[in-house]
Image: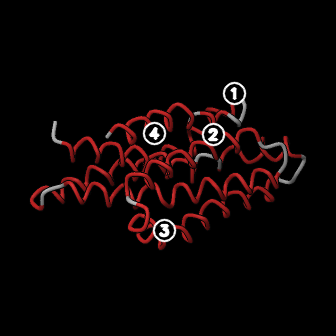
Amino acid sequence: MERWKILAGLVSFTFFMENLDATVIATALPQMAASFGRDPVDLNLGITAYLLAIAVGIPVSGWIAERFGPRPVFTLAIGVFTLASLLCGMALSLEQFIAARLLQGLGGALMVPVGRLVVLQVTEKHELVRAIALITWPGLVAPVLGPPLGGLITTYADWRWIFYLNLPLGSIALLLAWRL
């Protein structure tokens, strides 16, 4: 298999994880709020913190990748995202959760744009449209799957598993990024 296809698959995987995390907690908010002893509306801060961190981090991702190299930045971003997922699941208070979501958003902000940059660098011009399509489609499916998956998890398990799911996924992505 061509290298760009493998890298595009890896980046699409991280894009899926990032977009899934943006929506999967929506249906878990009541259970999360109860465990933190807060009103469900207070947990909107966790959603906002994640999206804000992504919005702030994306514009500087290119500069960071140029300064430190796309491979180490992409690999570090996956590691930060995965570690932050663990911290989200372990949060005992709303404040801890918001801090972990900020960190997770910053990891996500670097993960996808820098990953795309890596794919674009190794892809021949005539394959660019295919590469971008391969990266984009899984990420577009994630917001549709997020709320039902979050509801399923919180119905049959603890809300923390929403974030613990990222641990094996992030570990696989981290290993692949390191090796590729």
Q: Return the residue at label 1.
A: 157
Tell me the quarter of the image containing the N terminus.
top left
Residue lying at 71% horizontally and 36% vertically, measured from the top left: 159
Regarding mark 2 in the picture, which secondary structure is present there? helix
Amino acid identity at mark 3: Ile
Regarding mark 3 in the picture, which secondary structure is present there? helix
Assess disc 1: are there few (<14), some (14-19) or many (≥20) residues with their C-alpha within 10 Å of its C-alpha: few
Q: Earlier in the sequence, mark 2 or mark 1?
A: 1
Q: Return the residue at label 2.
A: 163
- Distance between the Cα atoms at labels 2 and 1? 12 Å
Q: Earlier in the sequence, mark 1 or mark 3?
A: 3
- Distance between the Cα atoms at labels 1 and 3? 33 Å
Amino acid identity at mark 1: Ala
Assess disc 4: are there few (<14), some (14-19) or many (≥20) residues with their C-alpha within 10 Å of its C-alpha: many
Q: Return the residue at label 4.
A: 174
Q: Earlier in the sequence, mark 4 or mark 3?
A: 3
- Distance between the Cα atoms at labels 4 and 1? 26 Å
* Residue furthest top as drawn: 156
Instruction: Return the x and y of residue 46 as percentages of the image width and height.
Output: 71, 57
Residue 119 against residue 9 in the figure, above or below = below
Classify residue 154 by image quadrant.
top right
Towards the viewer: 137 or 69: 69
Q: Nearer the viewer, mark 4 or mark 3?
A: 4
Amino acid identity at mark 2: Phe
User: What number is the disc on residue 58?
Assistant: 3
